[in-house]
Every structure is written in structure tokens, then in C-alpha cells.
Image: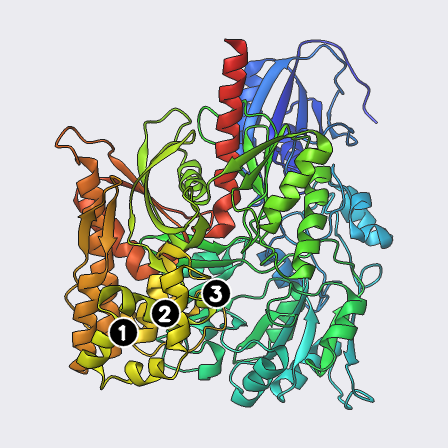
């Protein structure tokens, strides 16, 4: 060991994603190249560098590190000061120091190119080893239990290192230096193929259990496969019988299946792969990428019923790569669960719950500490946009905008659907992984478990809890309980204001920036007036908002049942526009007339007229449902949230150019502007009478709604004839995950001279809600602190 010396020295504090990603060996190599003496170590705040010399030495070291920054690392903050302690005579990597957590946990990462080459090379000791990894790739959040991120704080602690792995682990020049999940066939986890509900595995002389599993899939079997953050269910995507059987056994009737392919050349057979898509597929985040399904070959319709897109990912781990290495067709790789439940990650539960769905299981003995679903992205309007933020993204922190640097610690609970919570820590927002819908008991249990985990990992001590105003959201109820039990301040954020604030925060809009317009389109949220909102125009900042316009409210007969059964929304819109009897007289020959006549119309009429279980809703999502039902899409029911809208978008995308339908902009007595769809409905019903193709009707609707939204934003900007009230418009809410709508509204607004803010790193839907809640809560806490000082 080197002997410390005294003299001129500098201590450099680096915060960010700098632990478990190869940062210290990079600093070690750069420092040695520069001939510097000193040390580098991990602690609860990130990384500390102590070097001999002056600020010029420090600048040279930082420049060299940034130039050679490991792929998973990210530097957020650097501080330097004089160091009066002893410095080693050479440069060394010191032991980690304990302390409060102020650093980041890296997300799980795609197998890197070096490890991919290694498992294919017979001369390497990790040839065909399914758990090869290094500091540039492999499991992180899925195996971590505490920080600092060391092997003892992961589920790999159960596997002692062999001599060869230990030498790699201790060598700063090796890419596996302090790679906490390091393993090899001699000392690491192993894979096992087992039969589920069968007496024995079929005889097969394949080289190993992975190849045996691949052969079973190609023969038509369904395989339960233990992945990085949970089990998948896999089958041959080109085998229609296997796909249909998987749907029936999993009880997933309409939602598209995710696919995994050996490489991009296989994906190109089925999809148009843009350069942006290919970059995202191969990125360390390795998400499911949604692409247009217009390749030369076709997969069975049961893969993605009614849609014109497919969601593909590349092999995310060596195990996946080895499973697919000899397969020319893709595999379905859907979550290992019954429909609407979270993916199973416990081995005992997998045997109990997946027997009867899967024929066999390809499992292993590395414990998954934290369940993590696959992320989903799509290239829309010039950017790759996150639709579901999970593996590869979480728990990477998002820097908060200017003005939030000193934000106190706070906890935002998110919504009810697509549940995600958010911690504010050190001026950053830490979003959890997507967990699903909290109405499902297992998901709610997972949500509470992850809350405890994140607060422990990040040593989080919030001053306040921020919840949605909806009185029945389980996330809000839990947040209220937490505030009462812990004596924390409770802050309520209106649902759509939180969507706008999330879009502002993601785009770096400063705390004290002037108010901008938020257009929020989604399924539903609890409004200030006790009605359901979902088509809102808000002049907003982080501290508050003014509602300027809305979609005209229409009844939702049956309440929550209207979300599942689009025909109810169709009837409500017809009744609101022309009345049922008038509709039957004018359009009685249409199939929707006979279809609706078979429903309990008199009951719906009583519900609407008396306002019983038929809440008024300005919901854009329900308008999409109604139009979809009119053209025969998901008319009776939709099997997953947003199905009708997604299939209507697919209809529209396949249509030729069509003129937009008309919407009326009508001022109300309360001072709001309403977007009234009545003219649109009259034109749409006429088009149905004229047998216009459904795709053309769908496109006319999309274009008409986009025009109405943009015209409303232009009109509201100069409503009183004075100067513009805003020059920036934020587009947010789940309906803006619709590619046609986002592209056309954005183009119209930019053409009118507005700056347009949209989502990319955070979902536009409820998966991004917690970020906006957190920003609203922080702004509220700042104001309270200012009042106390005053």
C-alpha cells in the first residue's frame, strides 16, 4: 500500500450516476496517465477524488474523465475545495465510505458488446454463460438492496467469487473491476429447465438447457422464462396457434404482445425501422420500441389485434441472447402473469401461478430483489418518447429546472393507473419504475414495497407528501395516511395541473417562468367543480392555474362502466347532439342504430336525465371511445385501457388524405370557451350514411380535433384583443401518446408561432403524473418558506 504524504491537494466531489458503472477505474486510469497521486472512493453522496497538486491538475483530471466517461455514468454536479489531509504517493482506489445517501442507483442495462462477444467465443471461460456482465452492463436496480452499491448490498452476495473472478474484480485495469454482479460458470448463478405440470422433460441432446428451451419454443411450447426483473412468457411469434393459446391461457384478450428478436435484421422483416428506432433498440436501456408494421413479412394478427404497429426489443441479457441465437423468427416475450397482474418475479410463485399457462420454465438461482417491467418507447414527431418508464430508465434521476435547486425533500404519490411515485432529493426527481394499476391488490402491495425500498436506498426524509385530489385514488389515500402517521405536510395537486407541471419540469421550464398554456387530454381526472375533467386548457405555472377552456362535457352513463364499454359514450354523445329519437329517424338504417337499440336505452335515459351514475365529463378519452364505437371499433367493450383510441389511430393512419371535421368554439356563461363536437357528429353520421370507409372517418376526426385544439389555443392567447397572454404551449395527457394527434397539433401550433413543449423522457399519461405533483409540491413549500421568512 502506498504511503500518504502531506502537501498541496484538492478534494473533488462528484455527484450523479457514478457508482457501480465503472467510474472509479476510469478515474484511476486517467489519473495514472496524468501522473497524479491521490485516491478515489465511493461514499453516500457519490464519488470523492483527492489529488495532489493545484486546480490545473483537477481540471485535467475532470476533462480526461469526461472524455472517457463510462456508458452508464452521468455527472450531475462537481465541487472542488482544498484538501488538508494526507495523499498517497501514487493513485489508488480506496474502500467505500458510509454515510447518508446522496447518489444515484443505476438502472439495469443491456448486455454490452464486449460481453456479447465473450459469450460467443469458445476460447473464453464465459462462453455461453448466461450471466456474463461487467461495469458497463447487467443488473443494477433489480438486485440492489442498499447503497453504497457494493456486492454485499445485492442478491449476488450469496455467490462467493472464485479466484479468477476475484482477480478481475480487484484489478482496476479490468472492465470487471468492482462489477458487483460479476460471475462465471464456476462461481455464479446457473440456469435450469423444468417441466410445469408435466411428468418429465422430453429427451433432447441439445448442448444445454437454454438451447433445449429454444427448441421447445420453436416446437410450439410456451416457456416461462426468468429474466432481469421478472418472468416472461415466451412462444414462437410466427406460430399462430401458440400465440392464440398463450392469449387464452394468460387471459390477455386484446392488448398487444411484446416481441424479442435476435437482431435488427430480423425486426426489419416485419417493421419499418428508423435510425432513431435502431439507436434506441441498441441503447443500454434496451426498451420495447413500437414501430410501424409494414415490413415484407407478416406475423399473426393475434400478436397486436387491430393495430398497425409492433413492439420489439433486442435480447436484454446473455440468457435472452443465447435463447434467440439460432432463431430466425421472433419470440413473443410478454410479462409472466395473468392479465392486469404485475409480472411474477418470485420462483415459488412462478411455479404456482404459471403452471397451467406455460409448459416449461427456464429459471435460475439469482434472486430478483425488485420487480421491474420492460420499458416502452415510440418515435413520434421527431423524438423518441417514453410510453412506459421502467427497466433501463428507473431509477435514473431527472434534474429539476432552474429555481428548484434547493427544493426540500418531498414524496409525490402519483395516480391510480400506471402507478409511479417520485422522490425529490438534492434538486432532482427520482421516479420509480412503472408498476401498473393500483386497483389490482398485488400491484398495490408492490407499490408500497417499492416506496419503502426507494426511501431506504435514497435515505429519503420528506417534509411533505403530495397527492392527487381524487378522494378515492389508492395512492392518495396511502399518501394521506403517511402524512398523518409521520406528521408530514399534505399537499393536494389537481390531476391536470400535475400533467402540465410534469411537462414543464421535463422541459426545464424555470420555477419563476411566466405562465404558459397547457392542453391536457386524457381519460379522466377529478375536477375542481366535482365533475370529471379530461379535455382542459390551463394557463398555468407550477404555483397555480386558471382553466380557460374545455371540451364540452357529456354524460358518462354507468360511470366507470362507460370506460370499459365505448357504446355507452357513443349513445351519450348522440343523445346530447340530436337526441335518440331524432337519430333513429334520420339514421335508422345504420348498424349502430340497431346495435344501440339492443341496449338498455331507457335505463341510460333515466340515468342521464336524473344525473344518477352518469357524471358529466369533459374527457377527450371518452370522445375517442365514442367515435371508435361509431365506426365499429371496440363497440361493445375494450379489453384494455386505451384500446379503442389505439385502434382508431391505426384506422386513421391507413387512410388517404381527408378534410378535417368541424368543431364549434362556444363561449359559456362561466367565461370558459367550449370545444363542442356537435358539428363533427353531424358530419360523421352523414359520412356513415354515405358509407365512407372507417379509416377516412377516423382520419377526418383526428384532423378536425387537432385543428380545433390549435385554434382554441390561438384564440385564448389574445382573447381580449390585447397582447399575447402566452407564447408557449405544453401538450400533455395520455391522449397525446397518439402519434397523429401530437404531430398535427404540434405542427399547427408551431406554425402559429408558439413554442411547443412535449414529453420524451417521461410519459405524457399518468406514468408522468408524479413528476408534476413533485414540482407543484416543491413550489408550494418554497412559497410557504418565503412567507415564514417574511
Which comes before the other along the chain, label 3 or label 2? 2
Q: Which residue is mark 3?
A: 641
The label on residue 605 is 2
The residues bearing labels 2 and 1 have C-alpha atoms spaced at a distance of 9 Å
Q: Position of residue 133 (x, y in %)?
A: 69, 55
Looking at the image, which residue is at 79% across and 88% down? Answer: 198
Left/right placement of residue 16 relative to residue 642 reads: right
Q: Is residue 21 visible?
A: no
Q: Is residue 625 above or below residue 74?
A: below
Question: Is the residue marked by circle 1 packed among few (<14), some (14-19), or many (20+) residues within 10 Å?
Answer: some
Q: Is residue 352 above or below residue 129?
A: below
Residue 200 image-quadrant placement:
bottom right
Question: Is the residue marked by circle 3 packed among few (<14), some (14-19), or many (20+) residues within 10 Å?
Answer: some
Q: Position of residue 356 (x, y in %)?
A: 72, 82
Q: Position of residue 378 (x, y in %)?
A: 41, 59
Pick the front one: 598 or 261: 598
Element on which disc 1 rests: helix
The label on residue 580 is 1
User: Which of labels 3 and 2 is toward the front?
Assistant: 2
Left/right placement of residue 7 relative to residue 710 reads: right
Q: Quadrant of the N terminus?
A: top right
Pick the front one: 546 or 58: 546
Which comes before the other along the chain, label 2 or label 1? 1
The label on residue 333 is none
Which comes before the other along the chain, label 1 or label 3? 1
Amino acid at each position: 500500500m502506498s504511503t500518504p504524504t502531506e502537501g498541496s491537494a484538492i478534494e473533488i466531489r462528484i455527484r450523479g450516476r457514478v457508482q457501480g458503472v465503472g467510474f472509479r477505474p476510469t478515474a484511476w486510469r486517467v489519473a495514472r496517465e496524468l501522473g497524479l497521486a491521490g485516491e478515489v472512493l465511493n461514499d453516500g453522496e457519490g464519488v470523492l477524488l483527492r489529488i495532489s497538486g493545484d486546480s490545473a491538475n483537477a481540471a485535467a483530471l475532470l476533462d480526461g474523465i469526461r472524455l472517457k466517461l463510462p456508458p452508464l455514468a452521468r455527472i450531475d454536479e462537481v465541487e472542488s475545495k482544498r484538501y488538508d489531509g494526507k495523499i498517497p504517493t501514487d493513485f489508488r482506489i480506496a474502500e467505500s465510505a458510509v454515510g447518508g445517501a446522496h447518489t444515484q442507483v443505476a438502472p439495469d442495462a443491456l448486455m454490452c458488446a464486449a460481453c456479447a462477444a465473450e459469450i460467443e467465443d469458445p476460447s473464453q471461460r464465459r462462453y455461453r454463460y448466461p450471466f456474463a456482465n461487467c461495469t458497463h452492463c447487467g443488473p443494477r436496480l433489480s438486485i440492489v438492496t442498499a447503497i453504497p452499491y457494493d456486492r454485499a448490498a445485492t442478491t449476488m452476495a450469496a455467490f462467493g467469487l472464485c479466484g479468477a473472478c476475484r482477480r478481475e474484480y480487484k484489478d482496476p485495469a479490468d472492465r470487471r473491476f468492482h462489477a458487483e454482479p460479476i460471475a462465471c460458470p464456476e462461481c455464479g448463478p446457473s440456469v435450469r429447465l423444468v417441466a410445469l405440470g408435466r411428468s418429465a422433460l422430453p429427451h433432447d441432446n441439445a448442448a444445454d438447457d437454454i438451447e433445449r428451451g429454444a427448441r421447445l419454443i420453436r416446437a410450439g411450447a410456451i416457456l416461462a422464462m426468468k429474466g432481469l426483473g421478472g418472468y416472461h412468457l415466451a412462444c414462437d411469434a410466427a406460430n399462430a396457434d401458440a400465440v392464440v393459446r398463450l392469449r387464452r391461457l394468460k387471459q390477455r384478450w386484446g392488448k398487444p404482445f411484446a416481441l424479442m428478436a435476435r437482431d435488427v435484421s430480423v425486426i426489419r422483416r416485419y417493421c419499418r425501422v428508423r435510425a432513431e428506432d435502431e439507436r434506441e433498440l441498441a441503447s443500454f436501456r434496451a426498451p420495447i420500441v413500437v414501430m410501424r408494421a409494414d415490413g415484407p413479412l407478416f406475423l399473426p394478427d393475434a400478436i397486436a389485434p387491430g393495430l398497425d404497429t409492433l413492439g420489439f426489443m433486442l435480447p436484454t441479457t446473455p440468457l435472452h441472447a443465447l435463447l434467440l441465437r439460432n432463431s430466425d423468427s421472433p419470440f413473443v416475450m410478454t410479462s409472466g402473469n395473468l392479465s392486469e397482474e404485475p409480472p411474477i418475479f418470485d420462483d415459488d410463485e412462478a411455479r404456482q401461478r404459471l403452471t397451467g399457462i406455460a409448459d416449461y420454465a427456464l429459471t435460475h438461482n439469482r434472486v430478483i430483489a425488485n420487480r421491474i417491467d420492460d420499458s416502452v418507447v415510440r418515435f413520434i414527431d421527431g423524438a423518441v418518447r417514453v410510453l412506459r418508464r421502467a427497466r433501463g430508465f428507473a431509477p435514473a434521476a431527472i434534474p429539476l429546472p432552474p429555481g428548484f435547486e434547493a427544493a426540500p425533500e418531498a414524496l409525490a404519490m402519483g395516480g391510480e393507473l400506471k402507478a409511479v411515485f417520485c422522490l425529490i432529493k438534492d434538486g432532482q426527481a427520482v421516479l420509480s419504475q412503472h408498476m401498473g394499476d393500483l386497483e389490482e391488490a398485488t400491484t398495490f402491495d408492490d407499490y408500497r414495497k417499492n416506496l419503502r425500498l426507494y426511501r431506504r436506498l435514497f435515505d429519503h426524509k420528506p417534509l411533505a407528501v403530495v397527492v392527487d385530489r381524487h378522494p378515492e385514488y389508492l395512492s392518495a389515500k396511502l399518501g394521506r395516511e403517511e402524512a398523518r402517521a409521520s406528521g408530514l405536510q399534505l399537499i393536494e395537486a389537481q390531476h391536470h395541473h400535475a400533467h402540465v407541471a410534469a411537462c414543464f419540469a421535463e422541459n426545464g421550464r424555470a420555477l419563476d417562468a411566466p405562465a404558459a398554456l397547457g392542453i391536457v387530454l386524457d381519460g379522466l381526472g377529478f375536477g375542481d367543480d366535482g365533475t370529471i375533467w379530461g379535455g382542459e386548457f390551463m394557463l398555468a405555472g407550477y404555483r397555480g392555474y386558471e382553466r380557460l377552456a374545455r371540451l364540452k362535457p357529456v354524460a358518462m352513463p354507468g360511470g366507470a362502466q362507460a370506460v370499459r364499454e365505448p357504446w355507452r359514450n357513443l349513445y351519450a354523445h348522440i343523445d346530447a347532439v340530436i337526441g335518440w329519437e331524432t337519430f333513429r329517424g334520420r339514421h335508422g338504417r345504420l348498424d349502430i342504430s340497431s346495435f344501440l337499440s339492443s341496449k338498455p336505452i331507457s335505463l341510460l335515459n333515466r340515468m342521464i336525465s336524473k344525473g344518477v351514475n352518469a357524471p358529466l365529463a369533459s374527457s377527450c378519452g371518452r370522445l375517442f371511445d365514442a367515435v371508435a364505437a361509431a365506426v365499429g371499433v371496440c363497440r361493445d367493450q375494450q379489453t384494455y385501457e386505451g384500446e379503442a383510441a389505439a385502434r382508431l389511430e391505426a384506422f386513421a393512419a391507413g387512410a388517404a388524405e381527408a378534410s378535417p371535421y368541424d368543431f364549434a368554439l362556444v363561449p359559456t356563461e362561466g367565461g370558459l370557451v367550449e370545444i363542442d363536437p356537435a358539428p363533427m357528429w353531424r358530419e360523421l353520421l352523414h359520412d356513415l350514411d354515405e358509407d365512407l370507409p372507417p379509416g377516412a372517418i377516423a382520419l377526418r376526426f383526428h384532423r378536425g380535433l387537432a385543428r380545433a385544439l390549435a385554434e382554441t389555443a390561438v384564440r385564448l392567447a389574445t382573447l381580449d384583443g390585447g397582447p399575447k397572454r402566452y407564447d408557449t404551449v405544453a401538450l400533455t395527457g395520455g391522449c397525446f401518446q397518439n402519434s397523429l394527434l401530437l404531430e398535427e397539433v404540434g405542427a399547427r401550433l408551431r406554425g402559429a408561432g408558439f413554442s411547443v413543449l412535449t414529453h420524451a423522457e417521461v410519459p405524457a399519461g399518468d406514468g408522468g403524473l408524479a413528476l408534476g405533483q413533485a414540482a407543484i409540491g416543491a413550489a408550494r413549500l418554497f412559497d410557504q418558506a418565503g412567507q415564514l421568512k417574511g
